[in-house]
Amino acid sequence: MKHDPDNRPDWDSYFFNIAQVVSQRSTCHSRAVGAVIVDPVTNGIVATGYNGAAKGTEHCGTSCLTREPGKDWGKCRAVHAELNAILHAARNGVPTLNTLMYLSTTPCVFCARTIINAGIKEVRAMSKYHHEDAINLLAEGGVKTMVISPVELKHLLKVWHR
């Protein structure tokens, strides 16, 4: 199929698609999450992250599946996508101050605190995680949060066949 340069995805669709691709690297059995940190001035990608076991350690096991969501963190081996993206930026000496984060799902409370302290100013997510407290905490910390509804998501994301 020939490429049509006039039929390009908008920036939100572009970064949400990248977050979805990044999430495919997840080693978590219960959920795959992708994160993309973007400089909103240049639309350049600062860092990406997915949820999975810490570098050099054994991948997540089925014990993660036996825990109640949001509890029993001792059974979870994963570093969350948001934290991995922030750590990726830090390892490479790239600031996250005043950036924008695209996520496949809204963050947990721990990641919300990390996002606030990393200076990320806005979070855009494709779905809502069950922690409403995290969204409230982001708002309290001055981080704008936008959750894309499933109807809008179908409109935003395009399937690109070549």
Image (tube, rainbow, N blue to C red):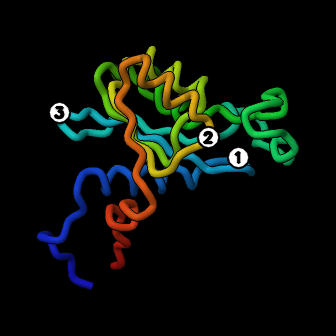
Mark 1 residue type: Cys
Read off the residue under disc 2: 51
Q: Nearer the viewer, residue 129 or 51?
A: 129
Q: Residue at x 40, y 51 (%)?
A: 148
Read off the residue under disc 1: 28
Mark 3 residue type: Val
Residue 140 located left or right of residue 105: left
Separation (CA) of disc 3 from disc 1: 33 Å
Separation (CA) of disc 2 from disc 1: 7 Å
User: What is the x, y in percent for residue 41?
Assistant: 17, 33
User: What is the x, y in percent for residue 106?
Assistant: 51, 40
Q: Secondary structure at mark 2?
A: loop
Q: Do residues under tags 3 and 1 come within 8 Å of each other at their CB atoms?
A: no
Q: Which quarter of the picture shows residue 39?
A: top left
User: What is the x, y in percent for residue 100?
Assistant: 33, 33
Residue 61 located left or right of residue 109: right
Mark 2 residue type: Asn
Number of the label disc, if any, that sits on residue 41: 3
